[in-house]
Amino acid sequence: MDGSGAKRPTHLAHHGKHMRIGIDCRLSGKKHAGLGRYTENLVKELLTSSKNESSEFILFFTDTTQAEEVIPKKTISNYKIVLTPIKHYSLPEQIFLPLYFYKENLDLLHVPHFNISLFYLKPLVVTIHDLLWHEKRGSGVTTLHPFVYWIKYLFYHLVTGSAVSRSKAIFVPSQTVATTVIKHYPHTEKKIVITKEGTQLHTPSSFPKRKANQLLYVGSLYPHKNIQLVIDALKKMPKLQLVIVGARNVFQKKVESYVKDRNLQNRVSFKGYVTDTELQKLYLESTALVQPSLSEGFGLTGLEALGLQTPVLASDIPIFHEIYENAALYFDPHSVESFMKAYTNLSKQSTQSFIRRANAIVNEFSWKKMAAMTYKTYTSIHETEK
């Protein structure tokens, strides 16, 4: 690592590369939830595929700690790390980040979120994981002062609109998200590429005994995640315990207060951020994973659960039906009674039948396939731009 934050492997030549591909990795890593996992696995797969050796990947990380978490120990592809200590969703992201991109003379830039820099005008692609804030808005989805919130909301629309309009391709994780993007931006239909995500937790050789009546929730605690429904169900199901895993944020305090107001502190556990090893253990020992969300772009945690043969209780919304098909038990996300019925039905399903269904679903999803489709799109765009 030199003073510029650039790291180059010495075992590969640095000439003759037909593409210089930049990837904004500032939101990579497990601490950035689903978006972080997506970016991390994209980078890992791109850097370990021999098919990508003809390109050089310029990876923009916030700091060395983040880069070391994401970069695999053994890489085949050529890469360079550039440290860009610029916070996402900030004014410096708009003003100063483009300077880092321009300096690297990229053939193509991949921003794995909607937050492009408006002043970067060279070819780019984006990933749109969802358009939640197009669908959900107002004081109920934020802790900001109303004036600040509406300023940020208008800027969000400006940046997102620019991102989908200027992108040479728009990656989305599901048909559900593709349909939503087309609904709001009809002109983007021909640019959309569906790249299904994958799982990175692996089935162990032996399974620990599951704890009876332990439900697991993995994810953020924004209002649309609807975790209050499960907490309300606990009041009517006195044997149930709920474990909540996810990076701490301002909404966690609201949920903690919700739990305290209902005198459920002894039955709801907040784990905060956990390692993959700890998370896998929680999946394996829990009765089921709960996903009561009102809106999602994908269903990554549910796939992780199914991959570890943990049942999934999911809200009856289109995205979960698309991803989990017949491997999950569904409930009305507005009805505690519907959730309780789905939980009761867990004990009625055949274990072997569930495992067959779960394995069939999980086998359809692969980070390797996702990265291969992404790289194929990079190549196609580069050939067109020549």
Image: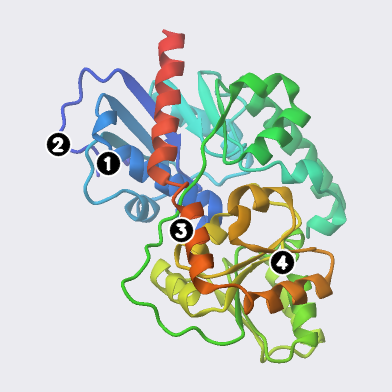
Viewed as shown, does residue 136 lie left or right of 22? right
Decide which of tag 2 and tag 4 comes sooner along the chain.
2
CA gap, disc 2 to disc 1?
Answer: 16 Å
CA gap, disc 4 to disc 1?
Answer: 37 Å
SS category of the residue bearing label 4: helix
Q: Nearer the viewer, mark 2 or mark 1?
A: 1
Decide which of tag 3 and tag 1 comes sooner along the chain.
1
The answer to whether mark 3 and mark 1 are in CB contact below 8 A is no
Outermost residue to the top: 386
Q: Amino acid at mark 4?
A: Phe
The answer to whether mark 3 and mark 2 are in CB contact below 8 A is no
Give the camera-side residue of 370 and 87: 370
Which quadrant would residue 294 be assigned to in this image?
A: bottom right
CA gap, disc 2 to disc 4?
Answer: 46 Å
Identify the image quadrant of the N terminus: top left
Residue drawn at x 58%, y 39% is: 113
Residue drawn at x 51%, y 60% is: 358
Residue drawn at x 57%, y 69% is: 311
Decide which of tag 3 and tag 2 comes sooner along the chain.
2
Decide which of tag 2 and tag 1 comes sooner along the chain.
2
Q: Within 10 angstroms of label 1, few (less than 14), some, or many (20 or more) residues? A: some
Residue where numbered disc 4 is placed: 251
Q: Position of residue 332 (x, y in %)?
A: 80, 63
Viewed as shown, does residue 189 lie left or right of 105? right
Which quadrant would residue 378 be assigned to in this image?
A: top left
Q: How many marks?
A: 4
Marker disc for residue 48: 1
Q: Nearer the viewer, mark 3 or mark 4?
A: 3
SS category of the residue bearing label 3: helix
Residue where numbered disc 2 is placed: 10
Residue where numbered disc 3 is placed: 359
Q: Within 10 angstroms of label 2, few (less than 14), some, or many (20 or more) residues? A: few
